[in-house]
Every structure is written in C-alpha cells, then in structure tokens.
Image (spheres, grey):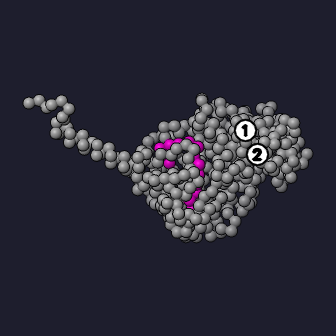
Amino acid sequence: MPTPVGRPLPLLAGLAALLALAIAAVLLSSGGDGTQDPAGDDRPPSAERWTGTWSAAAAAAEPGKSDGYADTSLRNVVHTSIGGTSARIQLSNLYGTRPLPVGHATLARAFAPGSPAVMPGTLRRLTFAGRPAVTVPAGGSVTSDPVRLTVPAAADLLVSTYSPAPSGPVTYHPHARQTSYLARGDRAADTAGGAYTRKVTAWRYLTGVDVRGPRTDGAVVAVGDSITDGNTSTPDANHRWPDFLAARLRTEPGAPRYGVLNQGISGNRLLTDSNRWSVSGGPSVLSRLERDVLSRAGVRAVVVEIGLNDLFKSPRRLDAEKLADGMREIVRRAAARDIQVIGSTLTPFGGHRGYRPELDAVRQDLNAKIRAGAVYGQYADFDEALRDPHRPLRLRPAYDSGDHLHPSDAGYRAMAGAVDLRQLKGAPVR
C-alpha cells in the first residue's frame, strides 16, 4: 500500500532527525555566530589574506616597571577597523631586557564598548606554535596561532595576557586614549570582567591584531606623531583621524575596504630617535619603518604625517631639504615593497607655546616642496584642511583642541576627509 501524502517513510524520518541534531550540535559549538567553542578548533582557517585590523607602535619602556607585571593579567581593549572570520595577535618585548613569560592568553569580543566583560560565546584561548604558554625573547616579538572568531569591523576586542613571573621592563604605548584593565592573578579566561578593577590608559605588550576573511583585502598604515596618535581626541571614543579614515573606508561607495593601522607615537620625529625611557618620542619614523609599517600584515598603503617634532625638539632639524630627503627615503623603501605612500603637509601651530617664526618658515618651505610634488608622489593637504582661512598660521578655532597644535575631534575628522581614497589604490610611485 502506498504511503499517504505528507507522512514520510520511517527511515527518512529518522535520517531527518539525525540531520537536525547534527546541525544543532554545530550551532551550539559555534556559539551561534559561526565560530568555534572557547576550547578551540583544530581545523585550519581558510586560505585568505591576513590583514591588520588594529595596531599600536611599541613606543617606550614603561617608567617604574623594571620588573614587569608578575602574577597580573592585562586586558587590553582595542577597536577594530575591518572584520574577519579568524584572528591572531602580536606581542612585543621590544624594550625588555629579560624574557617575557606569558602563561595564558585569550582573545574575545567585548560585551559592550569599553567593557572588560566578554560577549558570551566569544572567548578564545590563544596558543603559540600549538602551546598555551610562550616566552617572548628580550627585544623580540611573537605571533599567536590563528583562532576562529567572527570579528566585526568597528568593534571592541579584549586581548588578555597573564604573566606568572617578573619579566623586566614593560614595552608599552602610553598615549592610548583608550581605557584598558588590570587584575591580580590569572584572570585571562575571566568572562564577567569583575576582577578587572584597575583602569589604565596605556596598551602593554600588544602591538597588533590581524584578521582573515572574505573581505580582508589589505590595510593602510597611518604613521606619525601625536597628531596621528590622537592626542587630545576624546578618550574611549575612537575619534583619532585614522579612526575617521577607517569609517570612510567602511562606508563610502568605491572605497577600498582596507583596515587602518595607527602607528602614531606622541612626540615622534622623522630623523631622530628618543630615549627608550621617554614617554614621548619613540624611535624615529625612519628607524621603525620596517617594523611598524612595511612588515605589517596586508599593508597596501601608508599615510605619513610627521615633521613638526623635528622642528620643536632638540636637536632641532631646521633644514627643509634634509627633512624632505628623509621623507623621500620613506617613499623609496615603500615602493621597493610595492606599498603606496601618501604624504601630508605639516599643520599650523601659531599660538602654541613652541611657536617661533623661524620654525614656521621651515614648515612653510617643506610644505611648498610637498605641494610641488618634489617629496611625495601623492599627498593629503592637512595644513589646508585645518588652518584658519583668516589666520592661516593658526588652526581653525573649531578644529583647535585648545593648545593650538593638536586638533579637536572635529579637526581629526577634517584630516580624514582630506585623504583622497582613490590614491590608496594606486600603483606605488618610485
């Protein structure tokens, strides 16, 4: 007798039930977002391009922390610029004089912006060459193994590391404009965040987060001084000019969907290194170009904003042609790696306590060279974007943070608006 319509054969019904159970198991193990469970997944990620979604330059050795953070967990809060389906991190011990032991490390999405609490189902235990612990050599760095995690663009991630023992000087980025957290003991896997009672405003050891996925086509690096670092931007708001550039790249029609990596260091110079213990300065752009720019994951282009501190800080560099030569070296070295360079004019600082007519004359001379195409093949005119049309030696009042040097949030937005996005996709100028 034929089976009535609408009543499946018992065998087919059983198979359908088994299939439904299998699908449910997959969804449960992935936390409902297509990612692995917190214990990890041995499947290799898909063969897609690694691209930086966030970075911070190793700027100095932290003063007063010659023994590191023994028996302490650091939970760095970072903001992504491009999304992916797998992720990895970089840890740096650049300024360390002893090996840095990391006994436990995790990556997670934040439950809410700026929160130390973890979004349920997103905590990933990190490994390094397959092991849960790693020792970062003095002066060296390590990259974690990839983990499967859906990383959205424009979201906060939590990168937590636990050091069980003293480790020597701490490599850090002091002017983060972002609240991160510390906790006593091994709290790297803590999901509630309640143990992270101490707030800090610097990033420690963490220098990069990379993602991989269908849309990870490349990254642009913003390298420069405190103006790129975002000094005076609203804390915890992601209102540095590279953040506004990242928003443009995510939303504007025809824009390359690149990640944006902020490699600004407050007080940074083009030609001169600062003391390793100085909280303002860091290695010069030329000396850190390979580490902080050219070797970053997926880098396709770089926007250079640098030069004012070469005028301000001792020893002063007041030869515009020598400064231009340093900038031309950036172009040559980047072109050899097929990386596009967009330079920028130096911004006004009239009214700032460091203003001197002879310093501004060098700025004007250098800007004239940049605008004439004698330095960079392409440039963003940050000077024109920020200056007061009635008093061109000064910042426009709405764009002035109040110190007559650093832009306000509105000024940082105007800087991002001055970048021609079409130039980021062009062939490098040699």
**Residue 123: image location, x then y, percent:** 46, 55
Identify which residue, 96 or 218, lies in the foreground.
218
- Image position of 92 (left or right of 400): left
Contact? badges 1 and 2 (CB < 8 Å): yes
| Relative height, residue 209 to residue 213 (above, below) | below
Give whichever of 226, 324 is nearer the camera: 226
Q: Is residue 286 visible in the rendered structure shown here?
A: no
**Does the segment drawn in magenta span residue 76?**
yes
Quadrant where the C terminus is found in the figure: top right
Give whichever of 181, 281 is nearer the camera: 181
Q: Residue at x 65, y 30 (%)?
A: 422
On the rendered image, what quadrant is the N terminus found in?
A: top left
First to last magenta residue range: 73-87
- Count of numbered marks: 2
Q: Residue at 83% x, 55% y: name it.
A: 314
| Residue bearing mark 1 | 414
In the image, is residue 24 above or below residue 374?
A: below
Furthest residue toward left: 1
Q: Is-magenta flag for residue 272?
A: no
Q: Residues within 10 Å of mark 2 (few under 14, many from 20)?
A: many
Quarter of the image where one finds residue 338: top right
| Residue type (three-letter) at the residue carrying disc 2 | Pro
| Secondary element at tag 2 | loop
Q: Could you say which quadrant of the image residue 304 lies in?
A: top right
Q: Amino acid at mark 1?
A: Ala
Name the disc covering residue 407, or none.
2
Q: Which element type, helix, strand or loop, lies under badge 1?
A: helix
Residue at (60%, 29%) from the top-left corner?
254
> What x and y, as percent, mark residue 283?
71, 54
Q: Majority secondary structure of the magenta segment? A: strand
